[in-house]
Image (cartoon, helix red, strand yellow):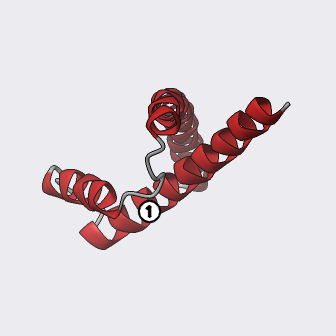
Amino acid sequence: MTKEEADRTLAECRQRIDAIDLELLRLLNQRTSVVEEIVLVKNALEMPIFEPRREDAVFRNVTAHNTGPLTADALQRIFARIMDEMRSLQYIRRQQAQQGKSE
């Protein structure tokens, strides 16, 4: 492979990654919108935000459908981080709702 071919291949791969990143962003924002609905329900029913069994179910779901090349451990770390951010958002929304009631 020549330097020019390598540069062209890298540029093409990076363009594909940029497009995939934008799709991931769209999907993460879509997931966040669903979490916004969930927090409304949880707040109305005074349900806990953290649900370990649900998080375990998410891990089982994604690892069961994984065809690689990501390992199950890698997927679990990625989804743990996603769920951590979603949980943080729920706590923020709950706090905002409680402040709105006290005003």
Residue drawn at (58%, 37%), measured in percent from left and top? 18
Q: For the view shown, which residue lies furthest in the bottom direction? A: 73
Q: Position of residue 39 (x, y in %)?
A: 51, 36
Where does label 1 land, which residue?
80
Q: Position of residue 2 (x, y in %)?
A: 53, 55
Label 1 crowd bin: few (<14), some (14–19), many (20+), radius 10 Å: some
The one nearer the camera, 17 or 77, is: 77
The one nearer the camera, 46 or 42, is: 46
The answer to whether residue 9 shows anywhere in this view is yes
Q: Position of residue 44 (x, y in %)?
A: 49, 32
The answer to whether residue 6 shows anywhere in this view is no
In this image, 51 relative to 17: left or right? left
In this image, 50 relative to 55: left or right? right
Q: Secondary structure at mark 1?
A: helix
Residue drawn at (30%, 62%), measured in percent from left and top? 70
Q: Position of residue 11 (x, y in %)?
A: 59, 41
Q: For the view shown, which residue lies furthest in the front direction? A: 102
Which residue type carries mark 1?
Ala
The one nearer the camera, 4 or 77, is: 77
Q: Is residue 9 above or below residue 67?
A: above
- Label tally: 1
The one nearer the camera, 65 or 45, is: 45
In this image, 103 relative to 16: left or right? right
Q: Quadrant of the C terminus?
A: top right
Q: For the view shown, which residue lies furthest in the right direction? A: 103
Residue drawn at (13%, 55%), measured in percent from left and top? 64
Residue drawn at (57%, 43%), measured in percent from left and top? 14
